[in-house]
Amino acid sequence: MNTLTAGDIAPTFTLQNQFDEAISLQDCLKKGPVLVYFYPKASTPGCTVQAQGLRDIKDALDGLNVTVLGISPD
């Protein structure tokens, strides 16, 4: 697996969301910019703080038409 660095173009992917719906990066990009963040496990203190930080700037991200995707192996 290749490691991405800032400025790299993300590979295309389609993953299931928490509602078992397929979410495609390409479909999200049609709406505007996408912010993808990764976390190791849901409902842990670190991921909660990270998600709360994004929640706190949601209005600003919405103003820029940014779709936020959080990805976890669980």
Image (cartoon, rainbow, N blue to C red):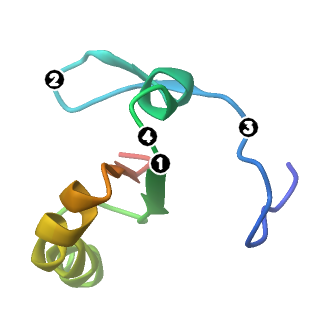
For the residues labelled 3 and 4, the Cα–Cα distance comes to 16 Å
Circle on res. 19: 2
State the image quarter where residue 16 is shown.
top left
Counting residues from the N terminus, which is met first, the one under dot 2 or under dot 4?
2
Q: What element carries label 1?
A: loop
Q: Mark 1 near mark 4, Cβ–Cβ under 8 Å? A: yes
Please give the residue where the numbered disc 4 appears in the rendered image: 32
**Which residue appears at 73% of the width and 37% of the height?**
11
Residue kind at label 2, given as amino acid type: Phe
Residue kind at label 3, given as amino acid type: Pro
Q: Is residue 31 above or below residue 61?
A: above
Q: Is mark 4 on a helix, strand or loop?
A: loop
Please give the residue where the numbered disc 3 appears in the rendered image: 11
Circle on res. 33: 1
For the residues labelled 3 and 2, the Cα–Cα distance comes to 23 Å
Q: Mark 1 Cα within 10 Å, few/some/many (few <14, many 20+)?
A: some
Counting residues from the N terminus, which is met first, the one under dot 1 or under dot 2?
2
Residue sitting at the far top: 21
Quadrant holding the C terminus: top left
Which dot, 3 or 2, sits closer to the camera? 3
For the residues labelled 1 and 3, the Cα–Cα distance comes to 15 Å
For the residue pair 51 and 47, the one nearer the viewer reads as 51
Residue kind at label 4, given as amino acid type: Gly
For the residues labelled 1 and 2, the Cα–Cα distance comes to 23 Å
